[in-house]
Image (cartoon, coloured by chain):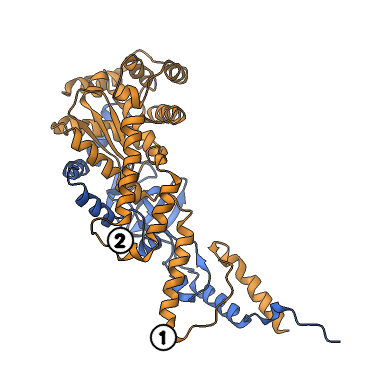
Chain colours: A orange, B blue
Amino acid sequence: MRRRWVILTVAAGLPLVAGFNIPSLPLPAPPLPSQAQKAAEVVTKTGTKAVQAARPLSEEEEYYLGRAVAARLLARYPLYQNPEATLYVNQVGLAVARKSSRPAPYRGYRFAVLDTLEPNAFACPGGLILVTRGLVRLCGTEDELAAVLAHEVAHVVRRDGITSISQARWSEVLTTAGTETARQYAGGVGGALVNLFEAAVEDVFRTLVVNGYSRPAEEAADREAILMLTRAGYQPGALAQVLGKMSGGSGGIFRTHPPTSERLARVKSLAPPAAPAGEKEKVRLQRFQKMKF
Amino acid sequence: MPRPVPQRAQLPWSLVAGMMVLLLGAAPALPESLTVTLSNQQLYSQPSFTSPAVSPVPQGAPVTLLRREGDWVQVDYQGKQGWLHKAAVAGGGPAVSLPALLGGGPVRQTRHDEVALAGKGFTPEVEAGFRQKNPGLNYAQVEAVERIQVDPAALQAFLREGGLN
């Protein structure tokens, strides 16, 4: 009789625990009061570690990686000191980013112009997007600038930068974060996590600056950019236009986002370039031309 | 000849029952409260970024869920009602540390803020260590970029002028 009651109680409890992660541990004997706190700490630690092992990078972690990558890039290229042009690039960037499938990352999107004539653009994880004066100059219209920025936003949306961090490295981060050593570590230099962070920053930096994204990642970012442009009210054909201008170059963006002929053909088939039409497009062109890059 | 009692019957069932009671006690049945997890957020009058902003809402602010519609949630923040994109909020219910409560029982699927308490991967402290180790990096410029603010009203005017959505 007693057993039946217990079984019913367990069955009634099942829907409640459906969302919980129950380790198949034998039930421990109640610890002595003096040991209770310690035992709870141990279980909290091991339990959290088990859950963490499967979790992806959080939005905050992605943000801190992005800041570090940006800090490396900004040590190499200074910011273009033109507040009016910077605000303009942010407005164009936000016009497309708010139409993306990730409109509000952890600290939001920010766009900045790098003071170099080498055409390039970098999507730092978390939403910091850096574009060079050289690339903005290559764009002849606001719609083309929007296309470039939409493509970079798409890499943030898709988290393409952080996929270069190997699963092995990330597992090591989580294991280290779960240890007592990491818990005791508080801001000092030389922690194991600092070394892992440094290595992860290097992984992302190499993708953004040296190796470029994979071809499937570039294709998907083009598609996402075309959707963003369309939703925002820009000419989606502007992406093909600006890609067409890039062909034939070498180094910089030509290496990190190679505008191959197949890529250009695919983008053209999705959104063919169109001649400027309508009053509003003229307004956009005029305000682009008013800016000095 | 008496049959041997199965080993299962030896389990401390009273402890299992006790755990279930604790779980029932821990399950919240409260009006749903959400937390704003992103900075620079606005309450919008409609479920759309193009609608007029009602009020800014700070990161970490608790808001009461009124209803959900697609990617948007309608919330009440200090008597002001408006819409937030679902990406800007998290949560529902108080965070109860079940492992500590049960002292060895089931572990709940960890929510993000609980991971924060238990030790995260890349934290501001890790960043501080990284910065000390790499003094040549230009965090000052990163922070200058992060200070760029686009006024929501100015963005609306910019979109309208350019015939954008």
What residue occupies the far right of the structure in this picture? B1
Residue A34 has which mark? 1
- Where does residue B93 sit, x and y in percent of width and height? 43, 65
Residue at 47% from the left image edge and 45% from the top image edge: B70
| The N terminus of chain B, quarter of image | bottom right
Q: In front: A217, or A206? A: A206
Left or right, A20 with respect to A184, comes to right
Residue at 24% from the left image edge and 31% from the top image edge: A89
Q: Amino acid at mark 2?
A: Gln
Q: Which residue is mark 2?
A: B78
- Where does residue A245 sit, x and y in percent of width and height? 32, 15
- Where does residue A153 sit, x and y in percent of width and height? 35, 34
Left or right, B8 with respect to A158, comes to right
- Where does residue B23 sit, x and y in percent of width and height? 53, 73
For disc 2, the chain is B
Query: Can residue A150 be seen at all in this image of the molecule?
Result: no
> Neighbour class for label 1 at 10 Å: few (<14), some, many (≥20)?
few
* Circles 2 and 1 on the same chain: no
Please tell me in which quadrant of the rendered image residue A237 appears. top left
Which element carries disc 2, helix, strand or loop? loop
